[in-house]
Image (tube, rainbow, N blue to C red):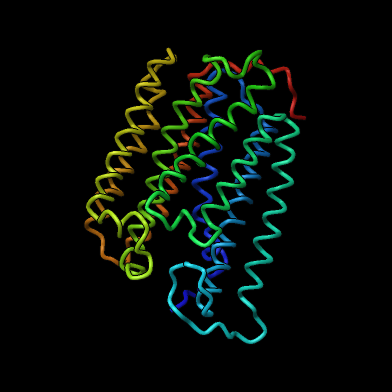
Amino acid sequence: MYRSDPLWKALGFTSLMMGIGAVMAGNSSAQIHGNAEFFPATICLIFVIFAQLAANSYTRYREVLYSMGYNTHIPVYKANNSTPGYDKALFYRVFSVGLGLVSLIAGLTLVSMGGIWFALVGVFILVTAWLMVGGSTPLLLSPWGCVFTFILFGPVTVISTSMLQSAHEATDPLSWFDISPALFMSGIVGFMSANAYLVYVYGNYYMYKKTMGDTFTPTFGRKATRVLVLINSFLAFGIYVWASFYLSLDNPWVAAAPSVVCFIFNIYIWWEMKHLPKYKLLTLADLACLNVLIMGVLASIVAAFVGIPDDSHMQVF
């Protein structure tokens, strides 16, 4: 039947760890070459948090409509939505609009900082986000949902966050020196975010196998999902270690330490995908999101020690 979850769970608060981790990873990419800026990074964080909450709330709104008998192609079981004095559909719809407006305000602030190029990025995010959770066939419910998760949380979030900070000090933020850390990190975070999506779909497979037939796991199989998670884990680890040496950082093995921690975490998740009971599989999705957050936080901490000292003339206070 329709799931009756607490609000924090209904709005997917645990998935915010993925978005926050992606922004932190973008911050570490700017920080590694002395371009970190507090204010732009904070606005990016606010934007990502509220944009994710708006998308999650809209997805839940469609679930409620489906549970009431409307064909929205969202895979939930039929249920009675008749709680006295409480219109769930209206609640989630209003929530999605309100949270979306806050993210729009933050997004316009970012556009005012970054100019026309960030306006184009904003349009791309808006269109892609709608295609992922809206329309008659949301991309998140297609076999290629992991690809769009890779793009949004990898290249789009990481590179945008890094460039927005670098643009304040760098003569040419698109120079290889300033953009290369973000390019490497975007692939790392992209593969880890794709894993979080794949683990989520994998965990939902048994509950939704009759109605979620177009997502990755029902389409390609449980074994293929585990194999792809393992491949993504090795790719993220390999890119991070190679970039640590390629960028000629001081103490490259120290710089690569976050990749070792997150790789071990990824292998643990991959192993448990096959061995955990069915009813516990969804907990692995939260761990996969947590792993992206760990990557972003550890990368930012390490960048403060092995990166180029901050030469910014801007003052926060």
Q: Which residue occupies 54% across, 21% down?
A: 179
Estimate the x, y position of residue 74 in percent, counting from the top left.
47, 67
Q: Quadrant of residue 249?
A: top left
Position of residue 25 measured from the top left corner of the image (x, y, whole percent): 51, 33
Q: Is residue 301 left or right of residue 119?
A: left
Q: Is residue 295 toward the left or the right of residue 30 in the image? A: left
- Image location of residue 247, percent across then percent down: 44, 15
Q: Is residue 202 above or below residue 151?
A: below
- Residue ID at (35%, 69%): 207
Q: Is residue 114 left or right of residue 159?
A: right
The outermost residue toward the front is 136
Instruction: Using the image as rendered, state which of residue 123 and residue 302 is in the foreground.
Output: 123
What percent of the width, then of the height, locates residue 185? 46, 29
**In this rendering, would 60 be left or right of 123?**
left
Q: Residue at x 52, y 85 (%)?
A: 80
Q: Is the N terminus in the top left, top right, bottom left or bottom right quadrant?
A: bottom left
